[in-house]
Image (cartoon, rainbow, N blue to C red):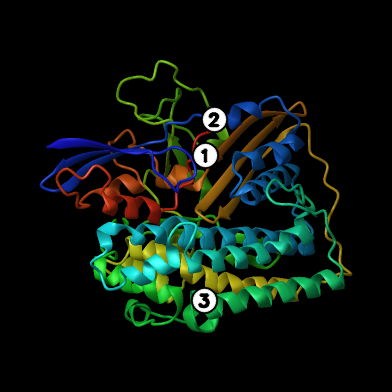
Amino acid sequence: MTELLVGPFNRVEGDLEVRLTLGGGRVEAARVNSPLFRGFEQMLLGKDPRDALTITPRICGICSISQSAAAARALAAAAGVVPAPQGERVAALIHAVENVSDHLTHFNLFFMPDFTRLAYAGHDWHGRAVDRFTALEGSGLRAAIEARARLMHILGMLAGKWPHTLAIQPGGVTKAPSMRDRLRILATLRSFRAYLEGTLFGAPVEEFAALGDVAALADWERGDAALFLRIAADLGLAALGPGQGRYLSFGAYPLEGGHGFASGVWDGALQPLEPARITEDLSHAWMLGPEAHPARGQTLPDEEMREGAYSWCKAPRYGGAVMETGALARQVIDGHPLARALAAEPGASGVLGRVAGRLLEIARTQILMERLAEDIDPAARFMDRVVIPAQGEGAGLVEAARGALGHWVRIERGRIAGYQIVAPTTWNFSPRDARGVPGALEAALEGTPVAEGDETPLAVQHVVRSFDPCMVCTVH
């Protein structure tokens, strides 16, 4: 039995270390460390509650709109209001653009370049992977970056800038789109659809979104998606890094009639989300304090870095259980048959399932964004006036690209008295809890093959990247 420290990882947002215990050519146990403490939750204490709208987007330059949306919803909840319906619609569109851009970036720039490595030179797909996904040079990378840049013109129109917009507010959005804006947005979405259908899927997005089972997915033969599926079949990525079958979603894109993608919990069957069941375990984190619901949690770093702890990341649990969150989780909970098949079929919920879940969500979100844009009413009200109370508390539960993101705020005497953030990577990259149960990534890495003497095992990297970690969002 030997130990191997893997990290830092390239093409990962922030710092990450994974300590592996190896035996028999496989990972027997994994401990995931978020080695960077940032302290945003402490920065917010004593501030005017509205400062959260400015400060929390700075947590991350990739998912800043997700942080904006969560902060705005938390303040709205503290004030006992909901945003203007058309404001909600535009906020959902702004958020969806960021999430789709994130998925596209992950697939093309973070995940697929691993398959261009010389270690895979003997495989018949390697030349195609090199042509499409070599860092800085691949034709697929260039096409994706250009399509992403065009799509994000919508953020210029509706959000003013990206990242770190102030467009999303507790009462709605600051920009009331004109009819001209609506037409330009629809034209931009048509252009992005052309990229998806010409390059990523090689077919109408509706066809990919209609895939109903794992066999139909495996038979897909068009676009860059087909290249990924060919690689996945050859390397056995379906069984690599399996999930535990428990998924959580706070619900994506809240609208007047319900979420764009539903909220809930999946553990073999769909259950309603009960936010009161969320706790954060600190037993293996360099943090002080008891296990608590985030609304009552604290951020007290353990400067002594006590023995037995190994990460700055807390361990979120739902009803005491480890939950996986992300695109696959959202699509499972929303009831999509392909996602549920990937989650249920033995040996399909691993690397293949997580990446296929993102591809599926890109297709479905494109359809959703078009519907949101079509239904914009320029004559409507997009912002209601909201007075933030001197006393109150609220939660903002949203879905970032990587999964469930929650902000919990407590206001006393007109100032922030408590602010806790649980990010998607906090869920997925958590350390063990008091019972010794590993977090989602730690469990997924068990059984991963590692060749003797391999200090940067590719299989481990595939599993890690399948979760698309954003470590700077993890520790506040």
Q: Is residue 52 visible?
A: yes
Within 10 Å of disc 3 (Cα), the crowding (few <14, some 14-19, many 20+) is some
Q: List x then y, in percent, for residue 48.
A: 76, 31
**If you read the primary sequence from the N terminus, does the residue marked by circle 1 or circle 3 appear first?**
3
Look at 79% across and 59% down and name the residue there. Answer: 84
Q: Which one is earlier in the sequence, the residue at label 1 or at label 2? A: 2
Are circles 2 and 3 on residues that touch, CB within 8 Å? no
Q: Give the quarter of the image for residue 295.
A: top right
Above or below, 126 against 390 in this view is below
Q: Which residue is mark 2?
A: 38
Task: Please name the residue shown 84% across and 53% down the image.
Answer: 384
Q: CA distance from mark 1 to mark 3?
A: 31 Å
Q: Residue at x 31, y 45 (%)?
A: 442
Is residue 332 visible to us here? no
356 is higher (above) or lower (below) than 454: below
Q: Nearer the viewer, mark 1 or mark 3?
A: 3
For disc 3, the marked residue is 199
Helix, strand or loop under label 2: loop
For disc 1, the marked residue is 472
**Left or right of 24: which side holds 292?**
right
**Mark 1 → mark 2, Cα distance in angstroms:** 8 Å
* Lateral position of residue 188 relative to residue 25, left or right: right
Q: Which secondary structure, mark 3? A: helix
Mark 2 or mark 3, earlier in chain = 2
Tell me how far mark 2 sits from mark 3, CA to CA: 39 Å
Compared across the picture, whether 110 is left or right of 378 comes to left
